[in-house]
Amino acid sequence: MRCSVADSMRKLKPLLYAIVTGAAVAVFLAIRACGERLPVRPGGGAAPGPASLRVSPDTLFHVLLALVAVIVVARVTGLVLRRFGQPPVIGEIVAGLLLGPTLLGRVAPAVSRFVFPPDTVSLIGVVSQIGIILYMFLVGLRLDLGHLRGRTTVSVAVSHASIVAPFTLGAALALWLYPRFSSSDVSFTSFALFLGVSMSVTAFPVLARILAERAMTATPARLARADMRGGRRRHRLVPARVPGRHGPVGAR
């Protein structure tokens, strides 16, 4: 009897997955149909593209200076927040806010321009992306795929459940935000996709750092990392782009 019930549930899982996915797509299409009829202010033309990469003779000095500043401030804030029971990665996030235009750029713009010259920001971004890629590669090497045998359905179900609800709510929120903050240069579809993905995206590198720093790399954490990786891959399939105040901002 138990075997028959288990077999029936196993057969129903693909159907339930299809129903949930289809319902999410149907809701988004309904939101899109309503959003396309919303009034929006006229646009001012295409947003300016990113500036060309110019390399000055002291570019290496400024890049190394920026990296040293980021590392030192991140270490200090990480040690401070560790005293309050927070993982050091939270301190690194705070360090990014302190060194960015939120604080340093507002309080000491001259210092901000010296440490992070506009000509080197693109290079620093490339270095940071390479660092994230290498770190994700190392995390993937430590993932025990053998432990996920027999748990694939659970992993897929959890990762999708963590996406569908916030994505739908974010897309619905676009109905209110689109007429107020967008223009005719941006289609409602792109705006809604960007907002939905932004609401449902999972910060997998941050999650992996927290699990490693907390020594929570046991079996439940491995399953959680698999769930987050599945969600991260699906988010990258949505190429939404919405122009911001300083140019186009893509969904990462």
Image (spheres, rainbow, N blue to C red):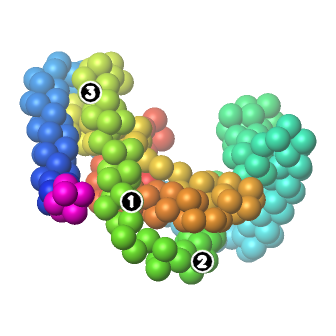
Q: Under tag 3, what secondary structure? A: helix
* SS under mark 2: helix
Name the disc covering residue 35, or none: none
Residue closer to the observer: 104 or 45: 104
Position of residue 124 measured from the top left corner of the image (x, y, whole percent): 65, 64
Residue 6 painted magenta:
yes
Is 246 contained in the magenta span?
no
Query: Secondary structure under badge 1?
Result: helix
**Span colored in magenta:** 1-7
Measured Cα–Cα span from mark 3 to mark 1? 27 Å
Residue lying at 16% horizontally and 34% vertically, measured from the top left:
27
Residue picked out by circle 1: 155
Q: Which residue is mark 2?
A: 142
- Residue at image location 68% in from the left, 54% down from the top: 210
Would residue 170 appear left or right of 51 to someone viewing this image? left
Mark whose residue sits in front, 3 or 1: 1
The mark nearer the N terminus, 3 or 1, is 1
Residue at image coords 12%, 25%? 34
Q: Residues within 10 Å of mark 1 (few under 14, many from 20)?
A: many
Label 1, label 2: how many angstroms apart (C-alpha)? 17 Å
